[in-house]
Amino acid sequence: MNAGTAPPAVLVLTGPTGSGKSELALQLAAALQPELLVEIISVDSVLIYRGMDIGSAKPSLEARARVPHHLIDIRDPAQSYSAGEFVRDARAAIAAIQQRGRWPLLVGGTMLYLRALYQGLAALPPASQGLRRELDAQAASAGWPALHAELERVDAAAAARIARHDAQRIQRALEVYRLTGVPISHWQQRTQGARGEFRWLRYGLLPMSGSHWGRHLAARFDAMLRAGLVDEVRALHARGDLSEQLPSVRAVGYRQLWRYCEGNFSLDEAARQAIIATRQLAKRQLTWLRREPAITLLPAHTVGLAAIVARSIHSAARA
C-alpha cells in the first residue's frame, strides 16, 4: 500500500504491565518501514502525567524522537483525566495521523481506555468529590473488598467484572449507583463505540507464566528503584499540592512509595507492597486480555516478534 494514502486500519498493541509493549512498538515501527509509517498513541493512565517518568516506564525522549508519540505528558499530576477525555483525544490523534497518510498504533495497558474507545462510553454522571471522599473513608475503615461486596448487592454484573481490590473502578461504580440509583452496568449497555468505524488490527502480549513472571515484575520494580524512583516520588510529595486522593498518586508503585514518604511504611515494606500491587494489576490485565474477542494473542519477549507482527500487518494492508 502507498504510504501516502489514508490508512484503512487502526493498530493496537496491548498487554499487562511489564510485557514489553513500548519496546516492541518501537521495533514494530522500524520493521514496518518504509512501506508503512506509524505514529504511536499512548494508552496509559500514568504516562499522561508530567514528572512521573521512572515509575511509569515512560519512553525516552530519544524513542519519542524516533517515532512520534501522542498523549504523553499532557497533564500535571494535580489534574485528573477521564476515559471520556482519552476517547476524545485518541480519536483526534487517530484522525490527524490518518490525514498524514500514516497508521495509528495504540500502545498501552490501560484496558478501561481501550474498552472505552472500542466499545464506547455511557453518558455517566460527573464525579462527585464529596461522595468519593465518603467512599474513601468507608474503604479506609472496612477495606475495598467490603465495598466490592456492597457493589455485588446493588450491581452484580459490574461486580463480576471488577476485582475485589480495584479501588478506582469499585469507587466509580458505587458513586454512579448512589448518585443515580441506576447500576453502572445498565448505563454501560447504552454505549456505542468506534468498533465499526475503523478496521482494527489488535495484538495482545501474553507474558511468561508462573513464578518466572512474578520474578520479572519484581526485578523490574527493583530496577526502577535503582533508577531513582524514590527521588521522583519525593519530589512529587514535596510539592505540597498532591494527595493520595488523586489518580496520579494512586498509580501502582507511586501510591506505595507515597506512603513511605508519609512515614507510614519502611522503604522495604513499600517496595514489597508495590510489587504485590504490580502483580495484581498484571493479573487483572491478563484476565481482560484473555476474555477479549477478535484480538491476536502473542507470547511476549519472543525473539523476532516484531517481524512476525509486521508480516501480519503487511498482509492485512494488502488485503
Image (cartoon, rainbow, N blue to C red):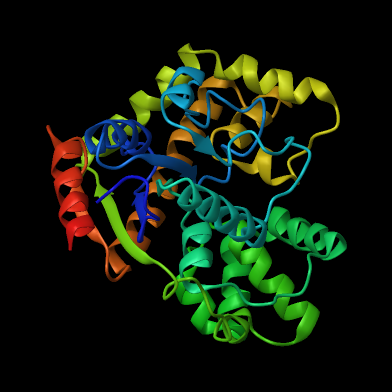
Q: Is residue 236 left or right of residue 205?
A: right
* Quadrant in the rendering for residue 200: bottom left
Q: Is residue 38 left or right of residue 186?
A: left
Q: Residue at x 35, y 59 (%)?
A: 9
Residue 92 appears in the picture as rendered: yes
Q: Residue at x 73, y 36 (%)?
A: 77
Which residue is more in the foreground, 288 or 91? 91
Q: Residue at x 63, y 14 (%)?
A: 231
Residue 209 appears in the picture as rendered: no
Q: Is residue 92 left or right of residue 279?
A: right
Q: Position of residue 141 (x, y in %)?
A: 72, 56
Which residue is more in the foreground, 138 or 214? 214
* Quadrant in the rendering for residue 262: top right
Q: Position of residue 279 (x, y in %)?
A: 39, 43
In which quadrant is the C terminus drawn? bottom left
Q: Position of residue 171 (x, y in %)?
A: 67, 64
Which residue is more in the foreground, 300 or 239? 300
Q: Residue at x 69, y 58 (%)?
A: 139
Residue 127 sits above or below residue 62 on the image: below
